Image: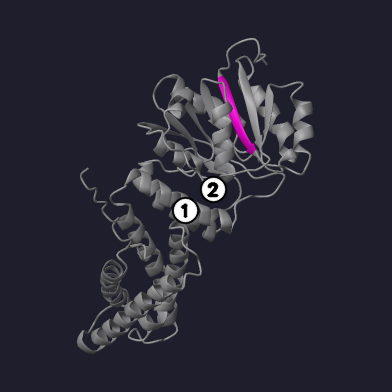
Amino acid sequence: MVSPASTEIDVSVVVPTLNEAGNLATLIGRIDAELRGRPYEILLIDDSSTDGTADLVRRLSAMNPVRLIERESPTGGLSGAVILGLSEARGQFLVVMDADLQHPPEQIPDLLAPLESNEAEFVLGSRYVRGASTDGRWGALRKLNSWAATLLARPFAGRARDPMSGFFALRRQTFQRAKRLNPIGYKIALELMCKCQVASVREVPIHFGLRTAGESKLNLSQQLRYLDHLSRLYDFCFPRGSAWVKFAIATACAWLAAFSVYVRLVAHDVSPVVAPTLAFAGAGLTTAVFHLRALRRAGKPLASRRDWIDFALVTIGEWSICTLAARWLGTHIEHLTVLQFFAVVFSAVAAARLALRTRMLHSLQGVRLAQSAPPARTIREAA
């Protein structure tokens, strides 16, 4: 270990923590084993842990170059903690990792190598490239969740296969050119890749371990925060086409929900003519969730009567088109497969959705735009 006070810091390792005391001693020891011999520091950004994290870190700091930064009023979730840590870091190379031992400290040198050789501006510890591995088995739901999250980020994550990774490295100069950082949730790598305008990303295969202590922070609330975060990034990266992209995403999610219901209904011998009408309930509920998010982003009351009346009218219109299209196909077109029948019906519904929202609400997000009167002109009389 090289004393950080004796020389310029080379590497800063930023670790956000929340009740991770059971992992910290092991984590710090493993980081030290990899970075020993070069000046480094570990910044632990703690969000008001209640498990004795602060006292433990103070004891560990006597033997290791560890700095504890306590956030009494955490804002921005894990992403906010990471941004604070990166801002306080003194190293030329910045590494971010979790405290739960799922990210292997032994691969920190692998993340630093492309930065040191100027082969990349941003390096991800990836779970999905050749040579990577994961402890334990992920269930189908978790795999689907990871796949969907990555797909939604594809427009601005480029070819990166694991832009959701929380284990990454970048130069301090890269971080310092970030514009309008405004992260929420836990996918901070995406925020930095976009706002730092990163030109080259390298993915390094890692072994993603199992949590050994503490509890996972991934829950439904974090998933919803991720959707809000994506919305902000679409606005930042595609200011002109953002509304269209988000409209397409919301519609695709709604149609996927409807299709899952439709397939189940047909499997239980419900007529393909009747099934779309019933399956539309899945689309309606999914759209309602996106409508709630749109109201919140627009700063409108979630119980706004007018906006929900608008939503109900549009939904009834879509459902009516769905019913009419299904009945017309059932009586005029023969030999359609189940998939073709669904595709034709919901293509008609998608066209109706676009028309109704743009004509009636003037907003692809389904929220009526405020129409304020133009300011009155002030006429000044000549003196």
Q: Residue furthest front?
A: 383
Q: Is residue 283 visible?
A: no
Asked which quadrant contains residue 209, the reply is top right
Identify the residue at horizontal 38%, vertical 65% (top origin): 367
What x and y, as percent, mark residue 100?
66, 41
Please name the residue that numbered disc 2 is placed on: 185
Q: Is residue 173 left or right of residue 357?
A: right
Q: Earlier in the sequence, mark 2 or mark 1?
A: 2
Q: Is residue 315 magenta?
A: no
Identify the residue at horizontal 20%, vertical 87% (top origin): 332
* Vertical order, 217 against 53 (above or below): below
Q: Which circle marks residue 22 in the picture?
A: none
Identify the residue at horizontal 24%, vertical 84% (top origin): 329
- What is the span of residues highlighted in magenta in the rendered image? 11-16
Q: Is residue 138 left or right of residue 150?
A: right
Please name the residue that numbered disc 1 is placed on: 228
* Vertical order, 260 against 145 (above or below): below
Q: Quadrant of the N terminus?
A: top right
For the residue pair 113 and 192, the one nearer the viewer reads as 192
Asked which quadrant contains residue 86, the reply is top right
Give the prevailing secondary structure in the magenta stretch.
Answer: strand
Q: CA distance from mark 2 to mark 1?
A: 9 Å
Crowd tier of the residue under label 1, counting other residues whose Cα lies within 10 Å: few below 14, some 14–19, many 20 or above: some
Circles 2 and 1 in contact, beta carbons < 8 Å: yes
Type of residue at label 1?
Asp
For the residue pair 202 and 290, the one nearer the viewer reads as 290
- Secondary structure under the numbered disc 1 in the rendered image: helix
Identify the residue at horizontal 65%, vertical 43% (top origin): 73
